[in-house]
Image: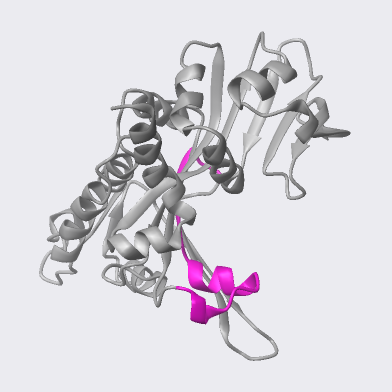
Amino acid sequence: MDKNERESCIGSSIRGVDNTAQSTLKGHCIAGLDWFEFTLWDFSVSAIMEQLLRLSPEQFQKSQGSYHGYCTKYTLGADGMITIWADGGVQQGVHVIITGRGCAYLQEVMPFLDLLMALSSLCVQVTRLDLALDDKTGNWYTVAQLVDHARSMEIISQWRGCDVSMGYSLTSGENDKAVIYIGSTRSDMFLRVYDKRLEQNARGVHLAGLPEQWTRWEFCLRNEKAQAVMWKLQQGSSLNQLFADLLSESMRIVKADKQQVNRSRWKVRPKWLRFVPAVAQADGCSA
C-alpha cells in the first residue's frame, strides 16, 4: 500500500467521526479517535510541535497557567484544539492534550498513525484516549432505547450503574440534550452515549441539515486502558474492530425473563448480536 492509499484508508477511519457525508453514504457506523492525551519525557516542546505533530511553533499561543503542577501552556486554536503543558516538576515531562477537533485537525496534516508509531519508540505515558462511534444509520439504538433497557435491567455489564442527563429548552420546552453514561465517569473506562443531533442543534446547527438519526457512542479510556488501546492501534487493529471489542467485553443487552431469576442466563437480544459485528465490519481499514 503506497502513501496515498494509506492516508485514504486512515482518513476514512479517523476523520469519519466528523464526516457526515461519508458515513451517510456508506450507511455504516464509523469509528474514530476523539481525544488523545499523553506525557513525554526527554523531549522539548518545540520538538513535539515540529517532529511529532508536524506543526510550526508559530501556530501556538504561549501563556501562563496552572495545570497539575505545570505553569506554561502552548495552545493551538481559540478553543484549545491542542494544548501542550510544560515547565512542571523535574519528573513531570511535557503533557499534550489533543481534543476531538484537534484529532480532526491533525489528520489534515498527517496520518494519525504516524504520530502513534512515532510514540511507540519514545518514553511516553498515555493518560487518556477516547474512541467515538457515529451511528447515522437509524438501524440501531437511541438514547431513549438504552434508558428503557437499563430500567428493565436488560443491560448486563461489568459496570454497576448508569446516569442519564436530559435537557430541555425553557423557551420552547423541547428536548435539547439526551445523554446516558454507563459506568462511573471517575473510572478508567466508561461509555457515554448521546443524541448528536440535539448536541449539534444546541451549537446552532439546523436539524434540517443533519441525519434523521445520529447517535454518538464514546468510550473514554484512561491510563492502562488507554495505553492498551494505543498499543493495539500501533499493531494494526482497526478502530471499528477495537470499538466492537470494547462493546462485547463490557456489556450486552438481553431480553428480560421473569421465569429466570439469574439475569446472567437471560438471552442476548438478536439486535445486539447483530449490532456488535456490524460495528466491527463497518470499516475495513486499519488505523
Residue 127 position in % (x across, y down): 56, 30
Residue 56 position in % (x across, y down): 72, 28
Residue 195 position in % (x across, y down): 47, 69
Q: In this view, does 35 lie above or below 196?
A: above
Q: Is residue 120 above or below residue 225?
A: above
Q: Is residue 77 above or below residue 233?
A: below
Name, please, the residue furthest toward the bottom. Answer: 172
* Residue occupying image coordinates x 28% and y 59%: 28
Whether residue 246 is in magenta: the answer is: no
Colour approach in the figure = one colour
Nearer to us in this view, 283 or 138 = 283
Whether residue 188 is in magenta: the answer is: yes
Residue 203 position in % (x across, y down): 65, 69
Place residue 109 in its image quadrant.
top right
Relative side of 81 to 17, left or right: right
For the record, the magenta segment spans: 186-210
Q: Where's the N terminus, which quadrant?
A: top left
Q: Can residue 262 be seen by looking at this rendering?
A: no
Name, please, the residue furthest toward the right. Answer: 64
* Residue occupying image coordinates x 30% and y 48%: 247
Nearer to us in this view, 161 or 48 = 48
Q: Can residue 140 be seen by looking at this rendering?
A: yes
* Residue occupying image coordinates x 50% and y 18%: 118
Relative side of 273 to 153, left or right: left
Q: Where's the C terminus, which quadrant?
A: top left
| Number of numbered discs overlaid on the protein picture | 0
Q: In this view, does 190 lie above or below 10?
A: below
